[in-house]
Image: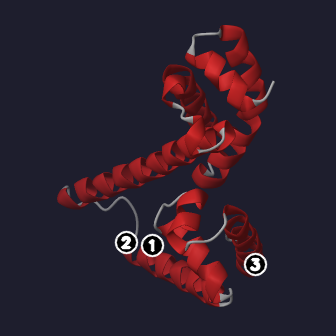
């Protein structure tokens, strides 16, 4: 059975259908989450949260708006981005608290210099992309849009956006070498 059919059955509380759907989508969900979150342990945790959310909210799936897999991967991407933002916010809170206590958690000057160098390196690598690749990558990874939302925003077919993203990310990976 395909994911769309299984998801409809899961919405009705069918546990067997959920087991089959789990087997079908757990790999792609983990892969997507892993690319966004990067930490393997947190990626596993986020993937499990997504699959639990899938069980709870399967009835919200609207087949008229897209495929089950794209809906599930959108849930995964959003949850992963939320985790990254949450971790970033927690780190910023810790830094503020450390500054208030007058005991820096680390060498701020070195950290700022390193972050500035990394930003500059990424900026230079982004400049090497074609304008179309850079636009797609920026919308997805800096502005947080899904591939489908990028396609809608740019009035392009989803396949075209996916191709631009794949090619752009390949170029970035080559340019950044061991940084990514």
Nearer to me, 74 or 124: 74
Mark 1 or mark 3: which comes first in sequence?
A: 1
Asked whether the beta carbons under mark 2 and mark 3 sit within 8 Å of each other, the answer is no
The residue that appears at 23% across and 61% down in the rendered structure is 99
Mark 2 or mark 3: which comes first in sequence?
A: 2
Residue 38 percent coordinates (x, y) = 63, 52
Residue 54 percent coordinates (x, y) = 56, 27
| Crowd band around label 2 with a 10 angstrom C-alpha radius: few (<14), some (14–19), many (20+) | few
- Vertically, is 39 above or below 44? below
Query: Residue 111: which numbered mark, if any?
Result: 1
Q: Quadrant of residue 148?
A: bottom right
Q: Secondary structure at mark 2?
A: helix
Residue at the disc numbered 3: 171
The residue that appears at 46% across and 81% down in the rendered structure is 113
| Crowd band around label 1 with a 10 angstrom C-alpha radius: few (<14), some (14–19), many (20+) | few
The residue that appears at 45% across and 72% down in the rendered structure is 111
Q: CA distance from mark 2 to mark 3?
A: 31 Å
What is the image's colouring?
A: secondary structure
Q: CA distance from mark 2 to mark 1?
A: 5 Å
């Amino acid at each position: 059975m395909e994911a769309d059919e299984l998801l409809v059955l899961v919405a009705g509380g069918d546990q067997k259908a959920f087991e089959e759907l789990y087997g079908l989508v757990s790999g792609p969900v983990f892969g997507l989450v892993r690319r966004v979150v990067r930490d393997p342990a947190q990626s596993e945790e986020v993937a499990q949260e997504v699959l639990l959310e899938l069980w709870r909210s399967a009835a919200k799936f609207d087949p008229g708006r897209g495929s089950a897999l794209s809906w599930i991967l959108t849930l995964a991407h959003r949850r992963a981005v939320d985790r990254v933002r949450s971790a970033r916010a927690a780190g910023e809170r810790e830094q503020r608290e450390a500054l208030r206590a007058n005991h820096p958690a680390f060498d701020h000057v070195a950290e700022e210099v390193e972050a500035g160098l990394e930003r500059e390196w990424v900026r230079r690598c982004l400049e090497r992309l074609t304008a179309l690749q850079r636009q797609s990558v920026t919308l997805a990874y800096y502005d947080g849009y899904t591939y489908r939302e990028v396609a809608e925003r740019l009035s392009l077919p989803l396949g075209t956006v996916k191709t631009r993203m794949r090619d752009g990310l390949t170029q970035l990976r080559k340019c950044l070498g061991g940084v990514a």
